[in-house]
Amino acid sequence: MDDICRHSVASRNTADAFLKEMLHYGFIRHLPIKYGRIRPFEPTAGTLETVAGWVMAHLKTLDSLDNGFRLAAFVAQPDLLAKLQPLVADGLLSSHAVREPRQTFSLFTWLDNGGIVMDWLMSGVDPDHADLDRIPTGVVSIGDFANWLKLSRTHLSRKLRDAEELGSIGWLGQRGHSVMWVSSEFYQEYMTAQAVKLAIIDAAFDNCVVTSEAS
């Protein structure tokens, strides 16, 4: 809670409410022991499985960049997640670039599933077109886009219009009925955010490996 407040991520009340929601939906649970008035939490098995999958996806990405063997090392050491995850969390929390992303990226992070909205937009970009000022995506129908993400079409349309007013997205033809494009600036914002995240994970992994070898 102190870290969340110190880095201005959320208020203490918001963080407390978030933890209670995690407890309610079974993402975390109370440990059977107490330390005075404090009742510690632990992640449930399903949460650990999801986090491990997230870590593995990013380690695989890092391996693809330098032909490394991070993923194989992670899979071979089941206890590595307990060492790696706190370092990654601290790195993300203390990074100004992560907490305060640039304009359009920040706009979408405040939308439910906003990260997936950006992921889906960018995944439809042909790398051969990445140097264009207006880069075509694979999105044509806002309705289909909203349905796939299980978002309100009205809410998604409002966010897309905000991004359009920033000059970050647009349509090659009729609005909402033709291929959507993203600006080169928005594309670079997204790529920079991914690079920062991957660098934090890479540094945390290296720290874990060095510590494990030393011990």
Image: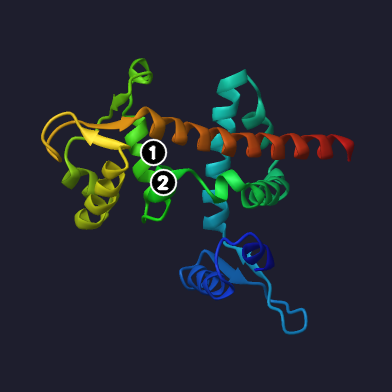
* Residue 9, position as x, y percentages in the image: 56, 61
Looking at the image, is 133 positioned above or below residue 199?
Answer: above
Kindly give the residue lying farthest to the right in the view shown. 215
Q: Residues within 10 Å of mark 2 (few under 14, many from 20)?
A: some
Which type of secondary structure does the marked residue at label 2 adopt?
helix
Q: Residue 76 or 70: which is nearer the viewer?
A: 70
* Disc number placed over residue 61 in the picture, else none: none
124, above or below 120, in the image? above
Single out the residue that lies furthest toward the bottom: 37
- Looking at the image, residue 17 sits to the left or right of residue 107; the answer is right
- State the CA–CA distance, disc 1 to disc 2: 6 Å
The type of residue carrying mark 1 is: Asp
Q: Quadrant of residue 56?
A: top right
Q: Residue at x 38, y 45 (%)?
A: 116
The answer to whether marks 1 and 2 mark residues whose Cβ atoms lie closer than 8 Å is: yes
Residue located 23% across and 44% down the image: 145
Q: Position of residue 5 (x, y in %)?
A: 63, 66
Q: Which residue is depicted at the point 56% across and 51% down?
A: 99
Q: Secondary structure at mark 1?
A: helix
* Residue type, label 2: Gly
Q: Which residue is mark 1?
A: 119
Quadrant occupied by the N terminus: bottom right
Q: Label 1: few (<14), some or many (≥20) within 10 Å?
A: few
* In the rendered image, the vertical position of residue 189 relative to residue 96, given as above or below: above
* Tag 2 residue: 115
Camera-side residue of 136 and 212: 136
Residue sitting nearer the eye, 54 or 152: 152
Residue at 52% from the left image edge and 56% from the top image edge: 46
Residue 147, image x and y in percent? 22, 49
Task: Give the quadrant of the C terminus.
Answer: top right
